[in-house]
Amino acid sequence: MSMIDNATRKTSALHDVLPSTQNGPISEEATANPLVSLAFAKRTGFRLRVSERRVVLMLIDVLLVNLALFVAGALFGNLEPTVDFVTANVKWFIALTIVWSGVATFFDSYSLSRAASTTASLKVSLLSASVTVVIYTFIPYFTPQWGPRSAFFAQLALTMTLVAAWRVTYARVFVQPSFQQRAIVVGAGKAGRALAAAIQAAPTNDANPYRGTGYQLLGYIDDDPAQRSALVEGVPVLGDHRALAQVAKQLHVDEIIVAITHRHAIEDDLFNALLHCRELGFRVVTMATVYERLTGRLPIDHVGRDLEMVVPMDDNAGERAYQAFKRLMDIAFGLFGLVLMGLVIIPVAISNARTSPGPLFYRQRRIGQGGKIFEVYKFRSMRPDAEKGTGAVWAQKNDNRITPAGRLLRKTRLDEMPQFINVLKGEMSVIGPRPERPEFVNALSLLLPFYRARHAVKPGITGWAQIRYGYGSTNEDSHVKLEYDLYYVKHASPLLDLRIVLQTVPVMLLGKGQ
């Protein structure tokens, strides 16, 4: 059968499944699209949401690492395979779970884009498994003290084998259509196009953050007559608001994504159609919510003037407790940081003096919480006259103003260590958006919406933007980093702070600074 005959047959079959109704017909050209034809397959499988995917990954990981401990101990150690013995020594399994959770977070093992790649997932699972077993072995009291070495090697081999096999299975099986969430997008304008383009984008230097999240965009709903029957980013426009409920039912949709930036301007007919879909049991979410969920960024170009989408507005009873706890942690980390700075200050001073004579420390005006200006402390990493004749400019890759010693300091982020003084003074926190120079803030505030909202919290030595994106030297970089910073401002919590701290260490060790 020819491709033309096959497409005609699919179109005809589709019209049998989804005829024109009083709710409005689906466009004929859209139904001819093979992607839509395939979407009308019978609802099958167990389609996992983003949060459910992470839970499944974590639960099975934990079960397997504990199973490896149990089997290795029963075969080669002094672990008796009885319920009473295991119950009496449950601390072994709790300790192993805690160690695994920390190590897996350290290596970002629960990135869905990474988990969907067989190669990347295999690499990170083997690394996490081996490091977990080694760390676990050297914890006294809370871990079994194996007699023979064979028990340790058996646990190591079993953990690596079981976790790696599971992760490869996940990467091969859980990306199949049976496990994907089906979605239609209401709005084929700028926000809708941006969402579709991001989901379908090919990976560049880093994996596409949408890959592995299980989203399958089936089509658009748009009331603009000019969009009728169009293909937008390769995704068809299926009709207007009159067809919304019918399309959602016939396509077995899991989620309806509202990609309209100025939602207060939604027409009554469309608004009622969305309410009707919610009444029918369909999940209705905004494009900004999906964008946050999948990328860990806040889409500042697609939230309009909705301040509640940018900064937390609710009266959270735990907010004061969190802020008090964070300040205590800042003091503890600040004191510990000063001790570490004392260990490296002499080598840094000697290397700076040999490669670029001048002051050891560098002070620079920055903007902190509430827009207040303060002086940040750093180990000097540039020539003393770095900005003579140019004024304030961003550091660039391979910047010739950076000294040989300064290049190492910046790559390992050791030049930031004197900022623990700012932390103890209360001007900064260990975790938060990086403080920016007043000259850049004034310009970026005019260029980027919501830029000053990042000053709602204390700036930090490290932060969500630093571990996810690194240094930026252009307005475009500042745009992306602002999306990460505002995500942190909105979602700051002890668990997110812990994740940032754990993932800052590999950034330093691998020299990902600039």
Image (cartoon, grey):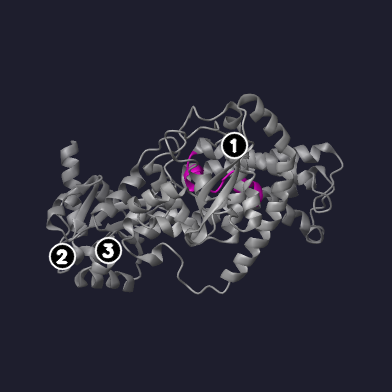
Mark 2 vs mark 3: in front? 3
Q: Earlier in the sequence, mark 2 or mark 3?
A: 2
Question: Which amino acid is tagged 3?
Answer: His
Q: Is residue 139 left or right of residue 492?
A: right
Q: Which residue is mark 2?
A: 24
The foreground one among 256 and 428 is 428
- In the rendered structure, does residue 237 fall within the stretch colored magenta? no
CA separation in Å, label 2 and label 3? 25 Å
Residue 150 in the image: state x and y as whole percent. 80, 37
In the displayed image of the protein, which residue is found farthest to the right?
A: 147
**Is residue 141 depicted above or below 471 in this figure?**
below
Q: Secondary structure at mark 2?
A: loop
CA separation in Å, label 2 and label 1? 67 Å
Dividing the image into 4 quarters, which one contains the N terminus?
top left
Question: Which amino acid is tagged 2?
Answer: Gly
Magenta-drawn segment: 101-117
Q: Is residue 224 left or right of residue 377?
A: left
The foreground one among 82 and 66 is 66
The foreground one among 388 and 251 is 388
Residue 263 in the image: state x and y as whole percent. 28, 66
Mark 3 vs mark 1: in front? 1
Q: Which residue is mark 1?
A: 380
Q: Residues within 10 Å of mark 1 (few under 14, many from 20)?
A: many
Q: Which residue is mark 3?
A: 262
CA separation in Å, label 3 and label 1? 46 Å
The answer to whether residue 133 of the structure is visible from this angle is: no
Residue 268 in the image: state x and y as whole percent. 21, 72
